[in-house]
Amino acid sequence: MSMVSRRGLLGGAAALAAALSGCSLRGKDVSADAQKAAEAVDGVSSVALEQRAGANFERLLNGRIEIAEEDRATGIAVYDDAMRVIVTVIHDRLDDSEARSLRVGGIMAELADGTELDVFVLDPDTPGEDPRLDQVHAGAFYGRYGLT
């Protein structure tokens, strides 16, 4: 029988940690490009986006889109346009698997009267009957926005 020595085990763990420390769990950061694109949408007052790694190592793009409209229907249309350009930037800048899996459910919109909107008002293609915002990924919008 062969036993792994403590020194060998610790050395292996150290090598693994060193290898993982060189990896970026965030992948390529598209937040600045997506933010710039969304800021150019008519009706958008400001955008603040941040890409980060989540608690379970999933990649998240979170933030807020401030919309210069008080009317809910008009605000939703502006939010939809902003999300279209954000998801298109993600689609264009990342490889397919990385782009589809990037979580975007944390991108909220705020109308001029303070009303908050979340991505569910845009009817993303989500599995299950009771999805959570943190489970909505960019790929859920590909059909809506004509991306493949």
Image (spheres, rainbow, N blue to C red):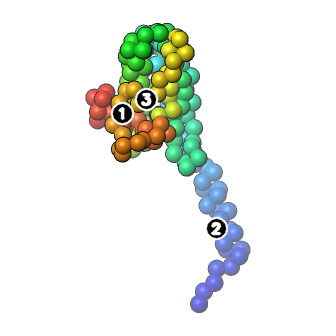
Q: Which of 40 and 6 is in front in this view?
A: 40
Q: Name the residue under label 1.
A: 124
Q: Do the residues labelled 2 and 1 touch (CB within 8 Å)?
A: no
Q: Residue visible at 46% across and 19% down?
A: 38
Q: Nearer the viewer, residue 51 or 122?
A: 122
Residue 48 screen position, x and y as percent: 56, 22
Q: Are marks 1 and 3 in contact (CB under 8 Å)?
A: yes
- Of labels 2 and 1, earlier in sequence is 2
State which quarter of the image contains the N terminus: bottom right
Tell me: residue 6, above or below residue 104. below
In this view, the mark in front (2 or 1):
1
State which quarter of the image contains the C terminus: top left
Residue 26 screen position, x and y as percent: 55, 41
Give the SS element for disc 3.
helix
Displayed quadrant of residue 49: top right
The span from disc 2 to disc 1 (Cα, nearest Å) is: 43 Å
Q: Name the residue under label 3.
A: 119
The span from disc 3 to disc 2 (Cα, nearest Å) is: 43 Å
Give the SS element for disc 1.
loop
Q: Residue visible at 43% across and 29% down?
A: 119
- Of labels 1 and 3, earlier in sequence is 3
